[in-house]
Image (cartoon, rainbow, N blue to C red):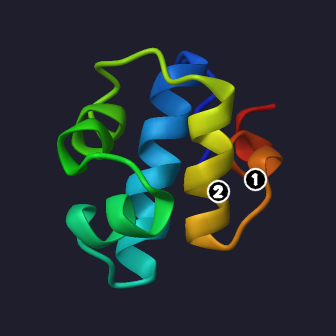
Amino acid sequence: MPYANTSARITLAQFLKKRRKELKLSQEKLAELAGLHRNYVGSVERGEVNIAIDNIEKIAKALEIKVCDFFKDSI
């Protein structure tokens, strides 16, 4: 699913939602695993917030992926 013409924020949002669903996690469960608020995770998935790199790292760990995996299909 290439995201060549989208911003990094939207690329991350789309990949995050896809990966979360693959793992059959709710936004609430992902937020718990990442130590973030559930509303924040929803905002990230909708591309509404400019997520900090520290929070990208927390979510990546919760999803059991590397940070770079969020962007690998965008190049």
Amino acid type, residue under disc 1 in the picture: Asp
Q: Is residue 10 left or right of residue 55?
A: left
Residue shown at 46% from the left, 15% from the top: 50
Per the image, the residue denoted by label 1 is 69
Q: Is residue 71 above or below residue 28?
A: above
Helix, strand or loop at label 1? It is helix
To which quarter of the image does residue 14 belong?
A: top left
Would you say the residues marked 2 and 1 are in contact, meaning their CB atoms lie under 8 Å apart?
Answer: yes
| Camera-side residue of 13 and 75 | 13
The location of residue 12, given as percent across then percent down, is 54, 37
Q: Is residue 48 left or right of residue 33?
A: left
Per the image, the residue denoted by label 2 is 60
Q: Is residue 26 above or below residue 45?
A: below
Q: Residue furthest bottom?
A: 24
Residue shown at 36% from the left, 34% from the top: 44
Q: Quadrant of the C terminus?
A: top right
The location of residue 41, given as percent across then percent down, is 31, 45
Amino acid type, residue under disc 2 in the picture: Ala
The location of residue 73, given as percent across then percent down, is 73, 45
Helix, strand or loop at label 2? It is helix
